Structure formats: C-alpha cells, structure tokens
Image: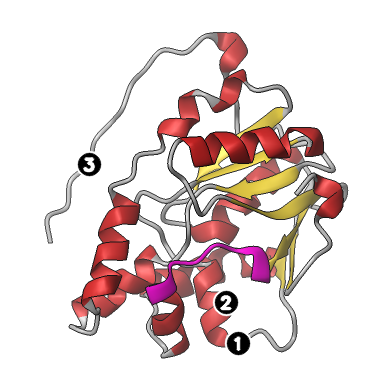
Amino acid sequence: EPIYGLVALGVIHPQRVIRNSTARAGDAIVLGKALGVGILSAALKKGALPDEGYRQMLACTTQLNTVGHRLPEMAGMHAMTDVTGFGLLGHLAEICRGSRLGAHVAFESLPVLPAALSLAQQGYNTGGAARNWASYGHDVRLPDDLAPWQQALLCDPQTSGGLLVTCAPQAVAAVLALFRDEGFASAAVIGQMQAGAARITVDYRLDLAHTGC
C-alpha cells in the first residue's frame, strides 16, 4: 500500500472562517456523507468485499467535499470539520472540547453505506476503530445494549469522509438543501449540541424536530 503525505495551503477571507471550536448550544449536527469506508476497506483486504460494496466505497471516497466553500456564506453556520481517521465520535469530540459543549447523537439517524452496514454486522472492522475508542471512549456514553459492531461504526476511520457541521435550527433546511444540491444525498441531521460538559451521549433515537429537521 502506498503511503504519502501532503500539505494543502490556501487563502480565505477572515470573516468566512468556520472553525471546529465555535459550535453553539442548541445547534443541529449535520453529517454530509455516509459512514463505513473503513469497514469496507477492512473487508477488501480480506477478500470479502462484494462488487457493490467496492462501488459504494469508490463513490464515497472520490466525492470531493465541494460544498465546503459554500457553507461559510450561509447564515446560522457555526462550526465545521471533516470526519477522517478519528471517526465520527472522535471529530465530534474535537468540536465538543473546542466549543466547551456536549453533544447528543441519534444512532438511527446516522447515514451508513449499505454494504458497510451488512459487513459490520458480520464482524468486519478496523484496528483503527479500536484505537480510536481507547483514546476518547471515556468521554462517550453509549446505550448499555449497543452492539460491538455499532460501537465500531461510530469510531470507524474514514478516508475522504463527510463534512461534520453544526448550525442553528433555522438554518437546517437550507444547509441540507445545499448538501443535496451538491450531490450529497446521504446528508442528515444526526444530533444536537448541548450545554454542559464536553461529552457525547449516544442514544438509538432522538426527537430532532426542534432542530429544524
């Protein structure tokens, strides 16, 4: 496997900068791409990835986050990052720590690549997911009956993962419309930022109607 590093440099107007430390209590949490790339990669290495799963993996990883340059122009946008090697919970934890807020996530609202869902249930996962959980699991509360494969999915390292944004409830409809206009059909509201300690609570489902969803 080729391994390489790179640095991307750019220029942005200071009034259009959106950080991962400026979320606000009550913000809706929006995820721009489906999860599961790491699980598909693990299955590929073991020769167990079906053709459809390979197509899903390529489609997800080659879709650039082109929506990112348009989001800062929208009213009500507060924080943004992308989900990569630390998995969904890891990058959400960064938002929580930087913003000094907690987060509540609805597992059943998470977009997941269909092939990854099936493979995760069969036990395919990555060593990276286990290391991720070991590094930040102490700041996460999960349902007592959450299955190991579900925990692994929450921590699954992503290659070219989706944008993770927080926005005011009144901006949700416009934010989702922008994602879908750019071709991100899986974009979804997955939870809400909350006042309190910088911890993440995961439940199976939440009433997200008040977030503008």
Circle 3 Cα neighbour tier, 10 Å, few/some/many (<14 / 14–19 / ≥20) = few
Left or right: 202 as drawn, with respect to 65: right
Start-end of magenta stretch: 107-115
Residue 83 percent location from the top left of the image? 48, 50
Name the residue carrying label 1. 147
Q: Nearer the viewer, residue 191 or 97?
A: 191
Q: Amino acid at mark 3?
A: Gly
Q: Earlier in the sequence, mark 3 or mark 2?
A: 3
How crowded is the residue under tag 2: few (<14 C-alpha within 10 Å), some, or many (20+)? many
Residue 202 percent coordinates (x, y) = 72, 68
Identified by mark 1, the residue type is Ala
Q: Which quarter of the picture shows residue 141?
A: bottom right
Mark 3 or 1 closer to N-term?
A: 3
Which residue has dot 2 on it? 151
Residue at point 84%, 41% (across, down): 25
Secondary structure found at label 1: loop
Q: Is residue 113 magenta?
A: yes
